[in-house]
Image: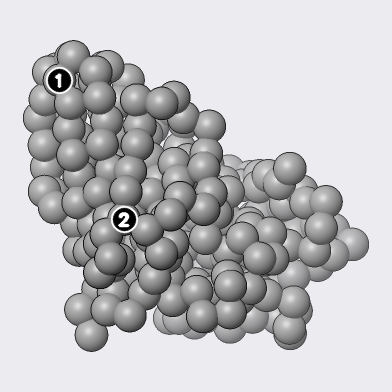
Amino acid sequence: KAGVTQTPRYLIKTRGQQVTLSCSPISGHRSVSWYQQTPGQGLQFLFEYFSETQRNKGNFPGRFSGRQFSNSRSEMNVSTLELGDSALYLCASSLDVAGGLTDTQYFGPGTRLTVL
Amino acid sequence: AQSVTQLGSHVSVSEGALVLLRCNYSSSVPPYLFWYVQYPNQGLQLLLKYTSAATLVKGNNGFEAEFKKSETSFHLTKPSAHMSDAAEYFCAVSRPGTASKLTFGTGTRLQVTL
C-alpha cells in the first residue's frame, strides 16, 4: 500500500505570496493532520481534517488554512507569506476507525517551504 | 494541557553500546505516548506507541520503551546501537480520543560512533 505522499517536495516563495501544499493520505485513511517543523519551534500541530471538516486546530494565525476533499486528499494554504513561515510542512494520515482512540498517524516526507 | 520534555538534544553512543533517550510527559489525563524517528530529509516514522495496554512496549529495530506513571516517563532504549540508528528521535503525547493531535518534544539527535 502506498504511503502518504506530499507535493511538491520543495518550494521557494517570496514574502507576501501565497502557497498551497497537497497531501494524499494512505488509501482508506480518513483523517489528515498537518504539522509545521522548524529548528526554533520544533514540531507544531496545525490542524486536522476528518470527513471534509476541520476537527482540531492548533495555535496558528488565520493565514494558515486547509481543506479536505471527499477522497480524503487534503490541501493547506498559507497566505501572505512571512519569512518565519519557512519550514518543513508534514502531513500525517490515520485510519480513525475507532474515533481516534488508539489510532496511529503515518507521516509523509514533507514539503520544504523556503520564503525569501 | 499536555507537554513532553526530552532531556538531551544530542546523545552520542558507540556502536554496540546501550541507547537511552529520555522522555518525560505531563498530562492531566492518562496519555497515549509515541516515539517517532526522523532520518535526514524524510518524514517521521513510528517506532512504538503506548496506549494503556502493556507498560513495556516493543518497537521496530530492537527499540523498546517503558511507561512509568510514577515517574511520568517513557524512555526509549535499545541494548546495542547500530550505525543505522543515527537519526533524530521525537517523543510525542496525545489525549485518548484525540490521537490525531500530537504534542511533540524537541527531539534528540542520536549519533553513533565506531
Q: Nearer the viewer, residue B27 or A26?
A: A26
Q: Is residue A102 above or below residue B109?
A: below
Chain letter for mark 1, please. A
* Disc number lying in front (1 or 2): 2
Q: Which structural element holds mark 2?
A: strand
* Residue that carries the numbered disc 2 in the rendered image: A68
* Residue that carries the numbered disc 1 in the rendered image: A17
- Give the side of residue A22 with respect to residue B35, left or right: left
Q: Amino acid at mark 1?
A: Gln
N-terminal of the pair, mark 1 or mark 2, is 1
Chain letter for mark 2, please. A
Look at the image and tell me in which quarter the N terminus of chain B lies. top right
Q: In which image quadrant can residue B93 be found?
A: bottom right
Question: How far apart, in angstroms, are the residues tagged by discs 1 and 2?
Answer: 22 Å
- Give the side of residue A86 with respect to residue B48, left or right: left
**Where residue A14 sits: x, y (%)?**
12, 18
Discs 1 and 2 lie in a common subunit: yes
**Where residue A57 sits: x, y (%)?**
51, 42
**Where residue B6 sits: x, y (%)?**
61, 47
The numbered disc on residue A41 is none
At x 15%, y 20%, the residue is A17
